[in-house]
Amino acid sequence: MLVNQFLLLGAVLFCVGVYGVLARRNGVLVLMSIELILNAVNINLLALGSLQGPQAAVVGQVFALFVITIAAAEVGVGLAIVLLIYRNRHSVDLDEVDLMKG
Amino acid sequence: MEPVFSAPTVDFHAFGPEIVLVVVLGVLLLVDLVFEERARWASSTIAGIGLLAALVPVLTLAIDGGDRTLFGGAYVVDNFALVLKGLFLVAGYVTVLISTDYIGDGDYYEGEYYFMLLSSLLGMTVMASARDLLSIFVALELLSIPAYLLAGWRKRDLRGNEASLKYYLLGVFASAVMLYGMSLVFGVAGSTLLSDVGAAVSRGPRSAPVITVGIVFIVVGFAFKVSAVPFHTWAPDTYEGAPTPITAFLSVASKAAGFVALVQLVFIGFLGRDDVWAPMFWVLAAVTMTVGNLIALRQTNVVRLLAYSSVAQAGFILAPFAVAADIPAARGGVGSATGAVVTYLLIYSAMNLGAFAVVMAVARKTRSGEIASYGGLFQYAPGLTVLMTIFLFALAGIPPLAGWYAKFVVFKSLLDAGTAAAIALAVVGVVNSVIGLFYYASVAREMWMSPVPDGQEVTPVRVPAALGASLALCAAATLAIGVVPNLVARLGNLALFGALP
């Protein structure tokens, strides 16, 4: 089994996710892009963990479980915030959220 | 196959502060659930007393002395952890004090507010002890997720929504990037313990590129958290749109937690690869100081001014990282850089919380954050004017107010390192201290010299008891530390890691 195929998949997913965060203007799609990055992390953790032997494989899998759980909590909060914006503005277009200019 | 898992023995005394916080969190939820509207007033009292109660185990652990290592080194209670737990709990207590009237007067949910605040503080106390990639990640999310919600606490306010959304998106993106870096570092080390990572990162040239990418991603992830330029864009908008007590909390406690994580990761995990992180921190520190200060110069809103000022202050805190590896062992080595960062954080917390407390006291009357509305403040609120002047000049670093000592320890660590790069960074820092004085003094001039704006009532400002207590606490700390810097110097020197490799 070649570990570099998994790492390549992880890197591609990461890049797609970063592109989505930077280019997408729809709040929900940005959340989905962030999920892609987190899944790239999970693939990396599992692949690199198994590369380092059985002990590290378990650690990597546990790490991935934590990432999955916390990502779910994060997205729950994120959807709540996007929903709040939709209620007040009737749109989830992030370009329109510009009352303040950083 | 023999079992790989054996239950760890748990030292419950070492978990004292966290256990108290968890119990208080449960009580807060139950009281809010059972008594509903009748116990609205009780939430802030329970939260405040709970935070003070959580300080008790911190003190008993400090008196007990000795380092406690749990879970095979993933969770360590040493002097560094105790000093920072104390800082987080006291900063949290002051935040509860300044929140009490703000949240009580507005039409906000109270029980949930303090529940979120304490959850975030729980994450910070865990962060101070986390010496493992996984526990740093969990602590970071535990302190961030409630903060995203707190930033948008004014649900019907469009600015509040925007503050929350910007903070959330950039925060989550940053932690995703950081996680990708962590996965790479874990992949090389084969372990999540920072001490194992420390041994693995300097093992040889074969895995060096992967480690380099991992370190860069992790540092960038935390640069968002501490709002270092160019990753600061969320900070001013979030600070302006969030409720002011939460702005104070984010700019002090949340930022300190980011620095704590950086100290642990860089000085334990990545110590052997200063060729990667030292130049990064040099650039981050120089750019953060300069850009933060220059943009602060042209702000007209006092909260945004304090936001950019806190960006600039973060630049000063980043400076010791840039030179840590060059400080000779005779002058304390990496430990003295850690001490400089911790000392700066302690002093910065007192000054900045105080400045925000004055802003809130004034806004109760003027309903405005514009600097112009501070005109002639001395005529009708002399006490607040004097306090604000103290905090502003402390932030600018003028003796005998606390800020000078914070700047002093940073410059001392830069000069101790003595390399050309360190001296250049010190010069940038000196120039920036002068620029900083301009905008801090411009607010002071507005208060003392300018006339009262038209239509502004000049009846005296009434300051509620809790807000007054927080002002007194911050002012006393700012003055006392400035005159007797040994008070924090001892804490800063104590705040070393128990078992540096």
Image (cartoon, grey):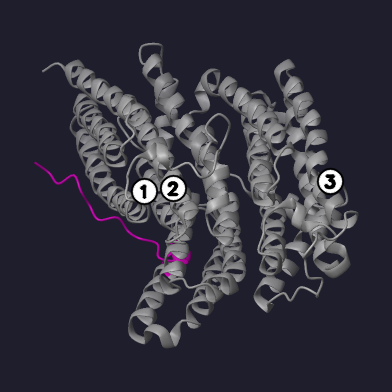
Mark 1 falls on what kind of element? helix
Measuring 72% from the left and 65% from the top, which residue is drawn there?
Answer: B362
In the picture, measured across the screen, residue B303 lies left or right of residue B50, that is right
The verdict on residue B6 being magenta is yes
Distance, label 1 to label 3, CA atoms, is 41 Å
Q: Are marks 1 and 2 on the same chain?
A: yes
The answer to whether one can see residue B418 in this image is no
Query: What residue would you read off at disc 3?
Result: B441
Dot 1 or dot 2, earlier in sequence = 2
User: Which circle, 2 or 3, is nearer the viewer?
Assistant: 3
Q: Quadrant of the N terminus of chain A?
A: top left
Measuring 42% from the left and 23% from the top, which residue is drawn there?
Answer: B201
Measuring 87% from the left and 63% from the top, which residue is drawn there?
Answer: B378
Mark 3 falls on what kind of element? helix
Dot 2 or dot 3, earlier in sequence = 2
Residue B127 percent coordinates (x, y): 46, 50
The answer to the question of whether label 1 and label 2 lie on touching residues, with beta carbons closer than 8 A, is yes
Dot 1 or dot 3, earlier in sequence = 1
- Say which of A10 and B326 sits in front: A10
Residue B241 percent coordinates (x, y): 53, 52
Magenta stretch bounds = B1-19
Using the image, tell me which numbered label, if any, was put on residue B452.
Answer: none
Bin the neighbour count of mark 2 within 10 Å (Cα to Cα): few under 14, some 14-19, many 20 and up: many
Query: What residue would you read off at disc 2?
Result: B130
User: Which circle, 1 or 3, is nearer the viewer?
Assistant: 3
Return the chain for callout 2.
B
Mark 2 falls on what kind of element? loop
Mark 1 is on which residue type?
A: Val
Q: In which quarter of the image is the C terminus of chain A?
A: top right
Mark 2 is on which residue type?
A: Ala
Query: What residue would you read off at disc 1?
Result: B138
Bin the neighbour count of mark 1 within 10 Å (Cα to Cα): few under 14, some 14-19, many 20 and up: some
